[in-house]
Image (tube, rainbow, N blue to C red):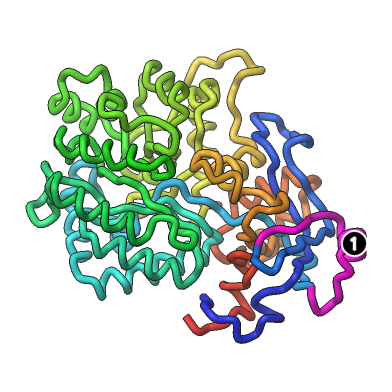
Amino acid sequence: MLSTSESDPSISKPKAVRGSIFFLTDDPGSKSDPQDCYEYYEDGILVLRDDGHILDVGPSTQTKAKHKLLANEIADYSGRLVIPGFIDTHIHYPQAEIIAAYGEQLVHWLEKYAYPAESRFADRSYAQAVSRFFLHELLRNGTTTALIFGSVHKISIDALFSEAEKLNLRIIGGKVMMDRNAPENLLDTPETTNADNEALIATWHNKGRIQYAITPRFAITSSPAQLSVAARLYHARDDLYLHTHVAENLHEIALTQQLYPSAKSYLHVYDDFGLVGSRSLFAHGIHLTEDEFNLLAEKQAALSFCPTSNLFLGSGLFNFNKAYQKNILLGIGTDIGAGTSFSMFQTMNEAYKVVQLLRSTHQPIQSENEAHLTPFKAFYLTTLGAARALYLDNKLGSFQPGKEGDFIILNLEATPLLQFRMLHTQSLSERLFVLMMLADDRVVEAVYIMGRHCYGHGADASY
């Protein structure tokens, strides 16, 4: 259940939460147990300020005494794992209805499934209904922040932001920009997209916890004139985002080369228009060249690794090792609706398998430099690492004092299989790995947004 009211403050907004508390403090690399990169309190307390920010975190007995906490001021989740909320770095909310659409690869999948679904978002009431469902699914799966594609319709992002505002969610989103190579009813123009984006930015950017992303779908569907508009909007303020796709599919890359023959590469199409830089995030990047990886690193731009959609559409295997070597800012994205699950656990599961497959089929490099998707690295990429990719690590991704109090409560014994398997784990690393391989939405017992209980048993049901 989702909540938007404070009808029972003792439940919805405690001063502290008790449980087994885990969070990353730095990139763990490929270390199997990087003890200098995380904090873990088997019996810990997370203390919240009245405004929902983190005040303190530490061992239960000392922290309770330090802050003179009374029993009725603590939400007790002893035996549960408390972690920062997941951050999804690439997802399409208008595509929720076409998850598990059979049989196509990227360009044909867009034409057969995605475009018809997105055309429905010209209807405001429909967009509002899907927005509610979509945000509920995010929270039900423990995702508290996401970078989100809307549709080409201005009202699609208005509806999404309106529903997110009710929940006080920190989300980033934008209206899709498409002025060619798509159905007529989904095209805008450089002039209309400029006006729509400016209006949305004026209304929503930095309103509460909402931020705006300039969102050209990809180079194939944007003319040079439209990419010029995107660049002007992106550079008009230093706190806007740029969100698009790159090098997902070989056919897509070939079409891009035909449309932009003078560009050095797919990513260089965007760079030629000034669209590669800080706060720019590119989804997929499966077929990036060495030069393109170097450009991302140089410009401090980010990638979103989307394993379930990459596999589902047969697009290819993301070169995780290359991104690791180049120290690319990286997050993980579910990429709904080509992605097949809202669950970051299931997405980490598939990411691990992709990395394993790459390790088995490519000539291994020096072992000390080889990338492994350890459980610590996976949880980093879905929390603090994702926050860094979005330039939000001063606000999200860990439990350092002053950060925003978005966190989730996980029941490690939510299913019989998990309960049985956890009996045979010997370390935190093992428990985290079992979670990323076997968990799903049933593990998410409660979700807190800015210190307030908004999902799970006991949450107010007014929404």
Where residue 289 sits: x, y (%)? 36, 19
Q: Is residue 371 above or below residue 152?
A: above
Q: Which residue is identified by label 1?
A: 66
User: Which of these two is toward me, 135 or 176?
Assistant: 176
Label 1 amino acid? Lys
Furthest residue to the left? Answer: 184
Q: Is residue 46 above or below residue 245?
A: below
Where residue 189 sits: x, y (%)? 12, 47
- Is residue 100 in view? no
User: Which of these two is toward me, 282 or 112?
Assistant: 282
Q: Report the magenta residues as a range.
A: 53-73
Q: Give the residue displayed 52% in from the left and 51% down from the top.
A: 87
Q: Is residue 430 above or below residue 448?
A: above
Q: Is residue 225 above or below residue 345?
A: above
Q: Is residue 62 magenta?
A: yes
Q: Give the residue displayed 69% in from the left and 60% down from the top.
A: 412
Q: Is residue 119 magenta?
A: no
Numbered label tally:
1
User: Which of these two is toward me, 445 or 149?
Assistant: 149
Q: Secondary structure at mark 1?
A: helix
Q: Give the residue displayed 60% in from the left and 30% down from the top.
A: 372
